[in-house]
Image (cartoon, rainbow, N blue to C red):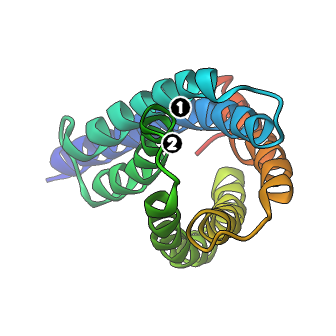
Amino acid sequence: MNTARKALQKQKAKSKRRLAMWLGLSLFYVGAVLCLNGLWMLGRIADREIWVINVFAGLVSLIIGLASAFGPEPDAASVKTGALTLLFAFTYLWVAINRFTGADGRGLGWFSLFVAITAVPVAIDTLLGARTAIDWWMAANWAAWAVLWAMFFVLLALGRNIGRVTGALCIAQGVLTGWLPGYLLLAGQLTG
């Protein structure tokens, strides 16, 4: 019985380390895409080239999300991680598709409302269960992402003129919620 329990604990620890590395990889490119999308919204990057980082970050997030949800020995935590990661993947791929099709973004705006509403309880749950530095950071990240996605809803679905403020917030969140924690996780300086 003890051997089975130890094996289960070892498996859970290995799964947690794998998810932390995938989180680092995902956040690193979330940081890149948010920074570049913010610069694009501020007119510093052309429509014709912003799709590249959105496709790349979307595919990285898609692969990580699917691997988390359907990979070896999925459990409730990995499926939840996968589902939440796919919110990012779908957002970035939709931005890229809109650049190709010339769509006005209203559909993406409404999807952003769905994500913003979803991010609020995720932030609260993460905060209530926080035990480590990355847990606290991720709780703050989810709260910040809820605000950012809500701003995308207001900008795209409601057509309000908040592009410059949204772009600036995108850049700030790219650094603070993506690039920095992603790099620190990948470097082993921030542990899950």
Q: Is residue 55 left or right of residue 14?
A: right
Q: Nearer the viewer, residue 155 or 89?
A: 155
Residue 79, x across and y down, in percent: 28, 54
Residue 125, x across and y down, in percent: 53, 76
Residue beneath disc 2: 95
Name the amino acid, label 2. Answer: Val
Mark closer to the observer (2, 1) = 2
Q: Is residue 103 left or right of residue 77?
A: right
Q: Nearer the viewer, residue 40 or 176?
A: 40
Label 2, label 1: how far apart the Cα atoms are: 7 Å
The residue at 59%/68% (across/down) is: 153
Callout 1: 10 Å neighbours few (<14), some, many (20+)? many
Badge 2 or badge 1: first in the primary sequence: 1
Q: Quadrant of residue 62?
A: top left
Residue 156, x across and y down, in percent: 60, 62
The residue at 61%/38% (across/down) is: 30
Residue beneath disc 1: 54
- Compared with 37, 170 (above or below) is below
Name the amino acid, label 1. Answer: Asn
- Compared with 177, 156 (above or below) is below
Q: Quadrant of residue 73?
A: top left
Give the SS element for disc 1.
helix
Residue 78, x across and y down, in percent: 32, 50
Say if mark 2 contacts mark 1, CB within 8 Å.
yes
Callout 2: 10 Å neighbours few (<14), some, many (20+)? some
- Compared with 6, 28 (above or below) is above
